[in-house]
Image (cartoon, helix red, strand yellow):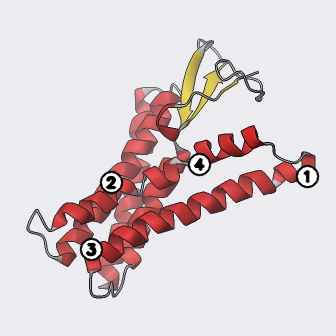
């Protein structure tokens, strides 16, 4: 049974993750009883959002609205794909997923969608900030990259990584984000 949910779960698993991230108990050295969050979906979702902004070409008559919808809907589609892959990949070979397994995987992968919200919000408010559409795109990609770095730092800290490793993962994710931004510069 999960520590707090009263539902069956895998050993060491705690389904009480806050903010849609998956919580796991750390049973290693010095980590007994501590929970850690799995933020990998947030890292993937932020990178996806940055890629969507970079790839957004002609956005039609209402470019801000179209980009907001494109970001959110792409996040939902990728979330659905991840849920499907988790549920129907290896799980069906072992046993059919029950309702709790489906809910658990949906919650586990939700950070993919959550990561699309800040860049979409940045686009939505960009007009209030006096930005044109190109400014909105730059703001959105900057917010997405900052989110990617933030999610990776949260993941590393939640896993109990030392600060040196937190700095490494933040740097790697920043470099990946800058690589995506360089694609925007090169493609224009």
Q: Residue at x 57, y 63 (%)?
A: 78
Q: Residues within 10 Å of mark 2 (few under 14, many from 20)?
A: some
| Residue 154 horizontal side relative to residue 81, left or right | left
Disc 1 and disc 2: Cα gap in Å? 37 Å
User: Which residue lies under the disc numbered 4?
Assistant: 109
Whichever of callouts 1 and 4 sits on the residue coming sooner in the sequence is 1
Q: Is residue 48 above or below residue 95?
A: below
Mark 4 or 3, which is nearer the eye?
Answer: 3
> Label 1 neighbourhood size at 10 Å, few (<14), some (14-19), many (20+)?
few
Image coordinates of residue 45 in percent, x first then y, are 48, 56
Q: Which residue is mark 1?
A: 93
Which residue does the image show at 36% across and 50% down from the upper left?
A: 147
Quarter of the image that includes the C terminus: bottom left
Q: Quadrant of residue 121?
A: bottom left
> How far separated are the C-alphas under marks 4 and 3?
26 Å
Point out the residue furthest to the left here.
130
**Residue 23 sits above or below residue 115 on the image:** above
Q: Quadrant of residue 60?
A: bottom left
User: Which circle's residue, 2 or 3, is located before the other in the chain?
Assistant: 3
Q: Nearer the viewer, mark 3 or mark 1?
A: 3
In this view of the protein, can residue 97 be seen by the observer? yes
């Amino acid at each position: 049974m999960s520590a707090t949910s009263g539902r069956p779960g895998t050993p060491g698993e705690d389904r009480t993750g806050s903010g849609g991230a998956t919580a796991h108990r750390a049973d290693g050295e010095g980590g007994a009883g501590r929970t850690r969050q799995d933020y990998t979906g947030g890292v993937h979702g932020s990178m996806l959002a940055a890629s969507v902004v970079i790839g957004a070409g002609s956005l039609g008559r209402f470019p801000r609205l179209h980009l907001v919808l494109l970001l959110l809907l792409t996040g939902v589609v990728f979330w659905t794909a991840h849920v499907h892959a988790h549920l129907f990949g290896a799980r069906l070979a072992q046993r059919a997923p029950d309702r709790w397994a489906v809910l658990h995987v949906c919650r586990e992968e939700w950070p993919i969608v959550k990561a699309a919200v800040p860049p979409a919000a940045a686009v939505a408010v960009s007009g209030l900030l006096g930005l044109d559409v190109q400014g909105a795109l730059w703001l959105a990609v900057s917010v997405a990259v900052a989110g990617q770095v933030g999610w990776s730092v949260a993941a590393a800290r939640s896993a109990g990584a030392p600060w040196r490793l937190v700095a490494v993962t933040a740097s790697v994710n920043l470099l990946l984000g800058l690589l995506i931004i360089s694609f925007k510069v090169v493609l224009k």
